[in-house]
């Protein structure tokens, strides 16, 4: 049986290379160029096209990741456009708090229509009484 030899293990560790190359390893030689272009307000797409024309094929997504991680640029959040909410027609009194789809009963037993709340519309299933003939 083979014996454990620390010297051979140390040699194997010294010779070890990872299977995947480091992230952005191809873009590191162009770090100065990319930083200069970003200072001149060049877009990620423009930088990617320029580098691709000069024998360094890359994508705008790779350039964006490189700028965020290597150059330390700030990631801006996406803008969200919010719809204007329409205020309810009549404010409810504190004693009248009820679910938005339920309207108060009128004198003849019918319910008055009320504006519906936003969100999914759930069907209201009512049992039908059989016609007496």
Image (cartoon, rainbow, N blue to C red):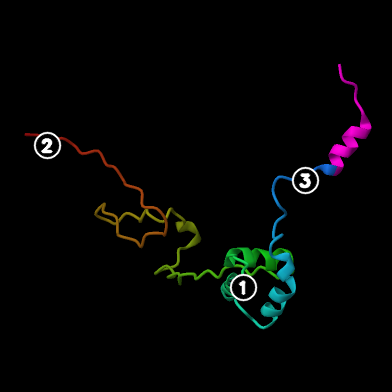
- In this view, the residue in front, 119 or 56, is 56
Q: Residue shown at 71%/76% (left/top)?
A: 33
- In this view, the residue in front, 111 or 36, is 36
Query: Image quarter for residue 5?
Result: top right
Q: Earlier in the sequence, mark 1 or mark 3?
A: 3
Position of residue 36 in the picture relative to residue 111 (left or right): right
**How far apart are labels 2 and 3 at the CA level?**
83 Å
Mark 3 burial class by Cα count in 10 Å: few <14, some 14-19, many 20+: few
Mark 2 burial class by Cα count in 10 Å: few <14, some 14-19, many 20+: few
Query: Image quarter for residue 101?
Result: bottom left
Mark 1 burial class by Cα count in 10 Å: few <14, some 14-19, many 20+: few
Q: Residue shown at 73%/70% (left/top)?
A: 31
The answer to the question of whether label 2 and label 3 lie on touching residues, with beta carbons closer than 8 A, is: no
Question: Which type of secondary structure does the marked residue at label 3 adopt?
Answer: loop
- In this view, the residue in front, 126 or 12, is 12
Q: Vertical placement of 94 versus 54: above or below?
A: above
Which residue matches tag 1? 54
- In this view, the residue in front, 32 or 16, is 16
Is 101 one of the magenta-colored residues? no
Residue at the top extreme of this rendering: 1
Q: Residue shown at 37%/59% (left/top)?
A: 116
Question: Which type of secondary structure does the marked residue at label 1 adopt?
Answer: loop
Is 4 one of the magenta-colored residues? yes
Question: Which type of secondary structure does the marked residue at label 2 adopt?
Answer: loop
The answer to the question of whether label 1 and label 3 lie on touching residues, with beta carbons closer than 8 A, is: no
Q: What x and y, as percent, mark residue 80?
A: 53, 69
Please name the predominant secondary structure of the magenta segment in the image.
helix
Q: What x and y, as percent, mark residue 123?
A: 32, 47
Which residue matches tag 3? 17
Which residue matches tag 2? 131
Give the magenta range.
Answer: 1-14
């Amino acid at each position: 049986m083979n014996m454990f030899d620390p010297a051979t293990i140390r040699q194997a560790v010294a010779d070890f290379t990872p299977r995947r190359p480091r992230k952005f390893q191809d873009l590191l030689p162009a770090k100065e160029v990319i930083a200069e272009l970003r200072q001149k307000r060049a877009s990620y797409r423009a930088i990617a096209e320029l580098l691709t024309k000069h024998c360094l094929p890359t994508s705008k997504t790779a350039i964006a990741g490189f700028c965020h991680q290597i150059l330390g640029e700030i990631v801006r959040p996406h803008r969200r456009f919010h719809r204007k909410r329409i205020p309810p027609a009549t404010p409810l009194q504190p004693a009248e708090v009820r679910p938005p789809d339920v309207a108060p009963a009128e004198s003849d037993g019918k319910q008055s229509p009320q504006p519906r709340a936003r969100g999914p519309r759930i069907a209201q299933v009512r049992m039908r009484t059989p016609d007496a003939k």
